[in-house]
Amino acid sequence: MSVRSHTLVVLVEDKPGVMNRIVSLFRQRGFNIDSIAVGHSETPGLSRITLVAQGDDRKIEQLVKQLYKILEVIKITDVTDENLIQRELALIKVAATDRNRSDIMRLVTDVYQARIVDATPDSLIIEVTGPPDKIDSLITMVRSYGIKELARSGVIAMARGTRAVATVPQPVVA
Amino acid sequence: MAIETRERQQVREEPQREPQLGAHLVMQALVREGVEVIFGYPGGAILPVYDALPYYPIHHVLVRHEQSAAFAADGYARATGKVGVCMATSGPGATNLVTGIANAMMDSIPIVAITGQVPQSVIGMDAFQETDITGITLPITKYNMVIRSVEEIGPAIQKAFYLARSGRPGPVLIDIPKDVQLAKGYLAPRQELHLPGYRPTIVPHRRQIRRAAELIRQAKRPLILAGHGILVSGATEELVRFAERTQIPVGLTLLGISGFPASHPLCLGMVGMHGHAHANRAIHEADLIIGIGMRFDDRVTGRPSEFAPNAKIIHIDIDPAEIGKVLKTEVPVVGDAREALRLLLEELEPLEHDDWLSLIRSWYRPIRTEPSGPNGILQPQYVIARLHALTEGRAIVTTDVGQHQMWTAQLYKCDIPQQWISSGGLGAMGFGVPSAMGAAIGRPEAEVWAVVGDGGVQMTLNEFATIVDEQLNVKVAIINNGYLGMVRQWQQLFHNRNYSETPISSPDYVLLGQAYRMAARRVTRPGEVDEAILWARSFRGPALIEFVVNQEENVFPMIPSGGTFRDMIDEYQVEGEW
């Protein structure tokens, strides 16, 4: 089985300590997180976590099963093989001079459809949105100018089409 | 006998007129959950609960160290099938529970641990005796929680007991800040719990049962590996019927012992690192392994890639995360062991495996139980064999961890469910004496023997005081070989007899027992063994016997860690004291 990048959408109850439980599970069982992004979902009280992790299918299956053992985890969907829209936001502060500023701006806006959101005499902040490989590519391109600061949001993902991963679970009576 | 998984729905709720202290509500909630015993130790942050405790019909057992409170709650749970409860204060009280909680997690034992916490106004301020116990126990509890308001007390305690005993059981910790114990409020009535992320599968999928039945029909050399799940679900009767109808032999994991009668002709005894040779050979030659309520632990499998090389695997477990974790599994069956066996019994007609069974029997060689070695010194195996014979195999037996544990697992043949209590997954030394305490409290009619080594007993022998306080019917059998014997055995076999830090001295156990006001004897010769055991059985109450045995006796057979059946060492291959 081959190791590849898996994208998991995890719906969790929005309660204190849940992220701690999830991150602790990764640490305890030796799984690595490439990216993690958290926010509200369409259902009040449920948060949506998008996790990107490397592993072969068996390792990811074990990860999913272990995640399900966390009480607050409601639903996990491996969307890796779906027709997927993946988006990440990055803010990149690059060094800029009078000589190269226009080169950078042209590269950023024309090739990557990104935006310049701040400028000083010796720096620019680029805001870029897109799949992670697009952001990787832009970072590679501007690295030679000198990256002063870089912030990435982590990937969020959604499958194309009408079907939704977020089914509201039936309450279970204990 | 099984762990009670059903909610007690009929609880008479008397409306409370006056608001009451949180501490009282804690006690009321515990009574409501059916708690009869708490093993605990008071301290500052749990003081309000201790202030309320005398007013409620719950027996509190004052242990001498909080670790023993957790171990005792564990032993109580294993012996009774009920949830064991331990209680401690914040800080060191809470951290002392940690080993016992980890033990319950590894062995799927339902315990609820209640800890006091500093008031919420100083949480996070490094207050006196403040410890982040929910953080510390996060990976070693099934669930844990902080009760943040007096209104949460009833629902939190109800939830804790439900989680501890349902599905795959495990420890739940409840941390209660002192200000919550001192706040006034009302006990919320028991209500339906809303746990959308917790849906244990009890009844297995019919299709998987049919697939399993088909593999069982086709198999020529099938073998059942039965684990602790048999005991948790109370499936002994179903397992016996299943094994008899299909004529499939049964190997037991360490924690599966007593889940299937050892004297049954289809029982092969314990498998794994120190399992019986014929049982491990049966695994090696099998064409189908049916794992039931067990998790293919490394002490069972050795090197997983070489485990049961010719067999397909059917794995029945209530925890889906255990299936496929270690071995590639042909048929996964998620569900309660008893439900799965019932469904399989519906599918399967009687089968015969005479050739396979007689082949396994031809491999059988008994574990040696000579009274003494060539040097004339008492042999530990003989002590266990005599203990089994003289107690007619009917005692509850707890063990510590090490050589004596393995000899007891091999030689104390258990026919009665829940008579075997041993620390498996965690392998926690110090477990034997306090778990015997818990068993004796939970089953006062029983004769409880704590078989311990001279290493482990010195970790928790402070509990002799508790045993004497409570006048428990606990007989402590110390198998004294002057070594941390199992570690010494590994040093002998794998580290060129470099006995680094394994010789260990002991106090005079007879004097020590007497100092604790406990009847005590020492046995050094084979001829004294029977008399001493009969003496200890001749009265009700605590007794201690020290058996001074051969120092460098080894546990055989042995499959070295990470090894395979082909690497098995038996006593004839090792130059020993024979």
Image (cartoon, coloured by chain):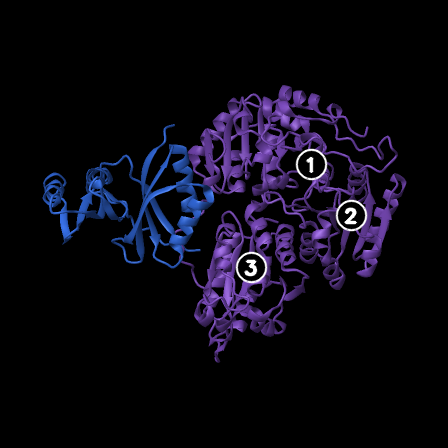
Chain colours: A blue, B purple
Residue B565 location, quadrant: top right
Q: Horizontally, is A66 left or right of B263 in the view? A: left
Q: Which residue is mark 1?
A: B262
Q: Name above or below for residue B248 compared with residue A82.
A: above
B75 or B354: nearer the viewer? B75
Local packing at callout 1 (Cα closer than 10 Å; few below 14, some 14-19, many 20+) is many
Mark 2: secondary structure = loop
Mark 3: secondary structure = strand
Q: Is residue B538 visible?
A: no
Looking at the image, is mark 1 or mark 2 earlier in the sequence? 1
Q: Measuring from the top left, give residue A40's x and y in whole percent.
A: 27, 55
Q: Amino acid at mark 2?
A: Ser
- Of badges 3 and 2, nearer the viewer stands 2
Q: Amino acid at mark 1?
A: Ala
Q: Which residue is mark 3?
A: B113
B540 or A112: nearer the viewer? A112
Q: CA distance from mark 1 to mark 2?
A: 36 Å
Image point (49%, 58%), residue name: B134
Q: Which residue is mark 2?
A: B505
Q: CA distance from mark 1 to mark 3?
A: 34 Å
- The residue most toward the bottom is B18
Q: CA distance from mark 3 to mark 2?
A: 34 Å
